[in-house]
């Protein structure tokens, strides 16, 4: 396998955020919309979900339609004092990542302080050459191609030399359009043309290297 850059999403890729973290962040985002857009809880939650489906990130809808300051939104919605209890760490993750040929980066729509905290709790923070969070994308989250192009320039690498490992199909479509190889972390039955390899979780990555 040629030397390449492994581009990892964070939440629901390197760890399972569904049981504890995502419900907390979703509640925080809904509360933020209630307070700053003067909406009741039902309307705020519906708008949060609508923007997430339409743009791939609630933040994108808020900055586009309401002039929300992204750093204000991200700070207030990613306060997780119980994060250490909420992160579900897979002990084998470190071994799996260390065995991959090439360099590794995290490419996440999450804010920088959250991404670094989670990686530290997963005990893999030292294995990544870079953490490109939403601040480094200038608050234009995936699947916007802007962040992808910045990532390629930042690491002076061609898309064809990258493998993106991600749970979001929309983000993988964006990666594939640029020429990246793609690994979809998903336990369902369906597949998609933009997916080169599908795995149930990142622990299965060593078994599919020959297909990448």
Image (tube, rainbow, N blue to C red):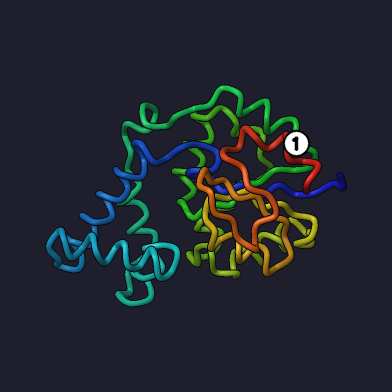
Quarter of the rendering containing residue 62: bottom left
Q: Relative to residue 63, is residue 110 drawn left or right?
A: right
Residue at image x 75%, y 49%? 5
Residue 15: image x %, image y %? 50, 36
Q: Is 113 placed above or below 175 here? A: above
Residue at image x 75%, y 62%? 159
Specify few, some or many for label 1: CA neighbours under 10 Å numbering under 14, 14-19, or 20 or more: some
Where does label 1 land, which residue? 100
Residue at image x 59%, y 34%? 125
Residue 194: image x %, image y %? 65, 62
Q: Is 54 placed above or below 41 here? A: below
Furthest-top residue in view? 91
Q: Nearer the viewer, residue 58 or 12?
A: 12
Residue 83: image x %, image y %? 37, 33
Dot 1: element: loop
Quarter of the rendering containing residue 177: bottom right
Q: Relative to residue 3, is residue 188 drawn left or right?
A: left
Q: Nearer the viewer, residue 2 or 35?
A: 2
Residue at image x 44%, y 43%? 114
Q: Relative to residue 35, is residue 100 drawn left or right?
A: right
Furthest-front residue in view? 189
Quarter of the rendering containing residue 40: bottom left
Q: Nearer the viewer, residue 52 or 62?
A: 52
Furthest-bottom residue in view? 65
């Amino acid at each position: 396998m040629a030397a390449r850059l492994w581009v990892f999403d964070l939440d629901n890729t390197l760890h399972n955020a569904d049981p504890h973290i995502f419900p907390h962040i979703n509640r925080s985002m809904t509360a933020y919309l209630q307070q700053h857009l003067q909406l009741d809880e039902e309307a705020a939650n519906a708008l949060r979900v609508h923007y997430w489906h339409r743009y791939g990130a609630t933040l994108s809808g808020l900055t586009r339609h309401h002039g929300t300051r992204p750093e204000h939104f991200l700070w207030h919605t990613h306060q997780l004092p119980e994060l250490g209890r909420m992160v579900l760490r897979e002990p084998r993750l470190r071994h799996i990542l260390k065995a991959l040929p090439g360099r590794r980066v995290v490419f996440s729509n999450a804010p920088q302080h959250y991404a670094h905290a989670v990686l530290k709790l997963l005990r893999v923070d030292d294995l990544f050459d870079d953490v490109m969070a939403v601040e480094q994308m200038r608050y234009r989250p995936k699947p916007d191609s802007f962040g992808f192009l910045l990532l390629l320039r930042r690491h002076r690498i061609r898309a064809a030399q990258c493998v993106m490992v991600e749970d979001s199909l929309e983000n993988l479509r964006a990666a594939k359009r640029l020429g990246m190889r793609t690994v979809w972390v998903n336990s369902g039955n369906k597949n998609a043309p933009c997916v080169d390899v599908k795995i149930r979780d990142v622990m299965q990555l060593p078994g599919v290297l020959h297909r990448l």
